[in-house]
Each structure stands twice: as structure tokens, then as C-alpha cells.
């Protein structure tokens, strides 16, 4: 157990620059998403908030999709997204696309939180804390780790392909790479459960409190 923990900490230290890069990329995406909200004109914000308001009314009326449908949708969305990162990590030329995917993921989070806060102030902050924060406390680290691991594997693959000292075995690092992503899939499954069963209930409670007051 200690050996595994030591190996993990050594891995993070050796690849700290990559983890910092992907974290900053995600953070810049979040900031950019918030900036997009501020760049929208009044009409665009009103149109978008109208649909959001309709969703809140449907939620209070109990006509929103059931938790099982949400779980299925959330699980397959994250699975496809993570699988794409996994595949791109095995192709050296796919690294820039991984950066774009992480950046876009940050934009989605930043825009979602930014729009709620921009339109509803502290009420929007409570809504974001109830509906966006719980699952993203797991999702964000997983995607940052997935992007980082994919980049590291791409560099490893490139080094082995360019090595001059005979044939370099690719199977061991590939198996480790696949095993890590299986674990990340499992962790994202927990996030999908939270997103489907915990967050909607928390959001509904906040919406009923705000609209009922």
C-alpha cells in the first residue's frame, strides 16, 4: 500500500508541470465562460433566462425527467467524453484536441455558474451550489486527471516510438493507461449518481425556497 502511494506521489512530482498546465487550462476555460456571460446583450440573457425560468416551473410541477433517465444520460455523456480523451491519448496528434476538450469543459462550468449568478445574484449562487457544485467536485478533478494522464501517455508513446535502442514494449504502459481510465470511469459513475439523484433534489429545494418566498 505504501509502495503504491509512494509511486503515485512520485508520478505526480515527475509530471507536475502537466498537471499544472491542465488545471490552468480548465481554470482559464471557467473564467472564459464567465466572460461570455458578461459579453451577452440584454435580449440574449432574457431569452436564455426565460427557458431557465420555464425549467424551474416544470421542476416545481414535477414534470422534469426522472432520476433514472438523468442517470442514463449523465453516465453515457461522461463515458463518451472520457472515452474520447482516452482514444486521443493513444494518438500523439490528438493532444491539442484534449486541450480543447478540457477548455470547453471549463467554459461550460464557468458559463453555467456565471449566468445564474449574473441573473439571480445570491439566489443564483445558491442554485449553482445545489445543482452544479456537488457532482463537479468529483467531475473536475477526474477530467483534469484524465487529460493529464492522456498527455503523459502520448509523451511516453512518442518517446518509445522515437527510441533508438531497439524495440520498446508498449503493452505495459498501455495496460496501466487503460487501468487508470477504468478507475476514472468508476469514479465518474459516482458523480453521475450524485448528478441524477442528489443535485436535482437539492436544486428543487432551493427553487421552492426562492420562488415560494
Image (tube, helix red, strand yellow):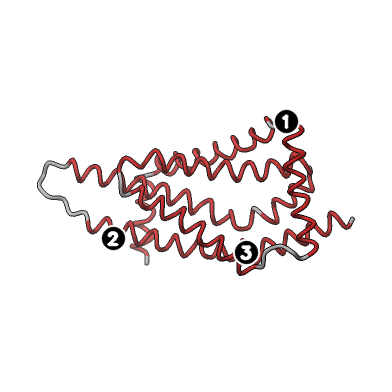
Q: Residues within 10 Å of mark 3 (few under 14, many from 20)?
A: many
Mark 2 = which residue? 175
68 left or right of 7? right
100 to 133, vertically: above or below: above
Does label 2 or label 3 sit earlier along the sequence? 2
Which is closer to the viewer, label 2 or label 3? 3
Does label 3 or label 1 sit earlier along the sequence? 1
Name the secondary structure under disc 3: helix
Q: Residues within 10 Å of mark 2 (few under 14, many from 20)?
A: few
Does label 1 or label 2 sit earlier along the sequence? 1
Distance between mark 2 and mark 3 Cα atoms: 31 Å
Q: Which of these two is toward me, 103 or 64? A: 64
Q: Position of residue 211 (x, y in %)?
A: 85, 55
Q: Position of residue 130 (x, y in %)?
A: 70, 56
Distance between mark 1 and mark 2 Cα atoms: 50 Å
Name the secondary structure under disc 1: loop
Image quarter hosting the N terminus:
bottom left
**Residue positioned 77% across, 39% down in the render:** 46
Whether residues under marks 3 and 1 lie with C-beta atoms below 8 angstroms apart, the answer is no
Q: Outermost residue toward the left?
A: 166
Q: Position of residue 18 (x, y in %)?
A: 40, 41
Q: Position of residue 49 (x, y in %)?
A: 75, 44
Image quarter hosting the C terminus:
bottom right
Whether residues under marks 2 and 3 lie with C-beta atoms below 8 angstroms apart, the answer is no
158 to 136, vertically: above or below: above
Q: Residues within 10 Å of mark 1 (few under 14, many from 20)?
A: few
Name the secondary structure under disc 2: helix
Mark 1 = which residue? 41
Mark 3 = which residue? 196
**Residue positioned 40% across, 43% down in the render:** 16
Amino acid at each position: 500500500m505504501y509502495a503504491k502511494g509512494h509511486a503515485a506521489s512520485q508520478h505526480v512530482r515527475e509530471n507536475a508541470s502537466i498537471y499544472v498546465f491542465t488545471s490552468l487550462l480548465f481554470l482559464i476555460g471557467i473564467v472564459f465562460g464567465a466572460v461570455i456571460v458578461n459579453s451577452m446583450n440584454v435580449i440574449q440573457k432574457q431569452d436564455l433566462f426565460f427557458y431557465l425560468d420555464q425549467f424551474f416551473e416544470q421542476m416545481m410541477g414535477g414534470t422534469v425527467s426522472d432520476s433514472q433517465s438523468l442517470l442514463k444520460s449523465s453516465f453515457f455523456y461522461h463515458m463518451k467524453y472520457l472515452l474520447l480523451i482516452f482514444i486521443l491519448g493513444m494518438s500523439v496528434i490528438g493532444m491539442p484536441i484534449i486541450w480543447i476538450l478540457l477548455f470547453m469543459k471549463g467554459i461550460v462550468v464557468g458559463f453555467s455558474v456565471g449566468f445564474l449568478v449574473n441573473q439571480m445574484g445570491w439566489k443564483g449562487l445558491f442554485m449553482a451550489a445545489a445543482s452544479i457544485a456537488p457532482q463537479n467536485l468529483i467531475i473536475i478533478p477526474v477530467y483534469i486527471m484524465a487529460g493529464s494522464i492522456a498527455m503523459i501517455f502520448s509523451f511516453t508513446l512518442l518517446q518509445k516510438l522515437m527510441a533508438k535502442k531497439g524495440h520498446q514494449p508498449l503493452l505495459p504502459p498501455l495496460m496501466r493507461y487503460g487501468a487508470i481510465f477504468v478507475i476514472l470511469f468508476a469514479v465518474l459513475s459516482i458523480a453521475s449518481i450524485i448528478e441524477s439523484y442528489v443535485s436535482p433534489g437539492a436544486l428543487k429545494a432551493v427553487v421552492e425556497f426562492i420562488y415560494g418566498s
